[in-house]
Amino acid sequence: MTKTPILQFENVNLRYSETEILKNINLEIADGEHCAILGPNGSGKSTLIKLISSELYPSIVKEHSQRKILGEDGWNIAELRRHIGIVTNDLHNSFSVDGGNLTGLETVMSGFFGTLGLFPHQIIENDYEPKAKLALERLGIARLETQKIGTMSTGELRKCLVARALVHPVRAILLDEPTVGLDIKAQLDFIEMMRALANGGTTIILITHHIEEVFEEISKVLLIKNGRIFAQGAKQEVLNATNLSQVFDVNLSLSHKNGRYSIEVN
Ligand code: ADP
Ligand code: MG
C-alpha cells in the first residue's frame, strides 16, 4: 500500500501584510522522496517551511487551492511535530541563547513537549528517557547526554536538535539550512547523518543554498526564486548549470563527482 504523501500543495499563496511572499506554490512530496529545496537568500524557503510546520497559514485565494500535510489540512503544531520533525536556525538560536544549562538529554527529552527544556509541571512518562537516549545513540552523539549546551560545538547542538525532533516516530524531517555555521568536517558529518536517516526510512526535506549538500539519496529538487517555484522535478533534470545560474543570478558551472555536486563561478 502506498503511504499518504508528505505534502500536497496546490496553488498556495502567502503574504505578509500587503507583500506577496510565496506565489502559486504547487508541490507534492511523496513518502520516501527525499527532497532538496534550493534558492537564494530571501527567496521564500523559510517561509515555505513555516507553511509546512503550520506556523503560518496560506492567504486565501479565489482559485482552487489546497495545503495538505500527510493527507490532512487542519493541523495544530503540537500534533504535527509527532509526525514531521522540524529543525530551523530559529530553534538553534533559541537553545543556544536560552538553553546553555540544559544537558543533551534534557534538550532531546524536551522534544516530547516542544518546549525549550524541561519544566516542573511537565509529566515525564517512563519511556521518555529511554527514547531520548535512543535518539542520541541513533545520531552517534550518546556522549553528549550529560554535556551542557553551553559547552557544545555548533554541530553538536545541531545534532541534538535533530535527535530532539526524532523522539517521535516522525515520517519526515525538515531541515532549514542545517549546516549553517558548521566547518567542513562537521558539514560532511552532518550530510552523512542525513543520509543515514534517509536510508533508515525518514523522508528528508532539506532547505539549503549549498548545492554540494544535495546528497545521493535526494531524488527531487525544487528551485525557488522570488517566492515562485522556478523548477521542480527529478534531481537529474532540474539540477543543471542553466537552471542554477538563473536561480542564483550568477553564471555557474556544475560538476558531479563521486556522488557529490559542486559549482564553479564562471
Ligand atoms: P529565505 O529563507 O529563502 O532566505 P524567507 O522565507 O526567510 O527567505 O523570506 C522571504 C521573504 O519574506 C523575504 O523578502 C523576507 O524579507 C520576507 N519576510 C520573511 N519574514 C517576514 C515577516 N515576518 N514579515 C515580513 N516579511 C517577511
Ligand atoms: Mg531562510
Image: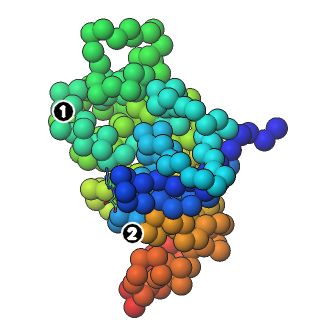
From this viewpoint, which residue is outermost toward the front?
A: 62
The local crowd at label 1, few if under 14, some if 14 to 19, many if 20 or more residues have their Cα within 10 Å, is few
> Residue 13: image x %, image y %?
52, 55
Mark 1: which secondary structure? helix
Residue 91 in view of the camera: yes
> Position of 55 compared to 144: left or right?
right
Q: Is mark 2 within 8 Å of ligand 1?
A: yes
Task: Work out how far the residue at label 1 is from the one at label 2, CA to CA, in angstroms.
Answer: 29 Å
From this viewpoint, which residue is outermost toward the bottom?
A: 266
Identify whether 161 is placed above or below 101.
below
What amino acid type should be assigned to the residue bearing mark 2? Answer: Pro
Mark 2: which secondary structure? loop
Viewer-nearest residue: 21 or 89: 21
Tell me the residue at 58%/32% (across/down).
74
Q: Earlier in the sequence, mark 1 or mark 2?
A: 2
Identify whether 21 is placed above or below 202.
below
Q: Is mark 1 within 8 Å of ligand 1?
A: no
- Find disc 2 in the rendering and name its residue: 40
Q: How many marks?
A: 2
> Residue 62: image x %, image y %?
60, 53
What amino acid type should be assigned to the residue bearing mark 1? Answer: Asp
> Position of 179 compared to 243: left or right?
left
Quadrant into which the C terminus falls: bottom left
> Mark 1, mark 2: which one is toward the viewer?
2
Identify whether 186 is placed above or below 85.
below
Viewer-nearest residue: 32 or 262: 32
Tell me the residue at 30%/8% (across/down).
121
- Find disc 1 in the rendering and name its residue: 98
Tell me the residue at 46%/76% (across/down).
247
> Residue 116: image x %, image y %?
29, 28
The local crowd at label 2, few if under 14, some if 14 to 19, many if 20 or more residues have their Cα within 10 Å, is some
Quadrant into which the N terminus falls: top right
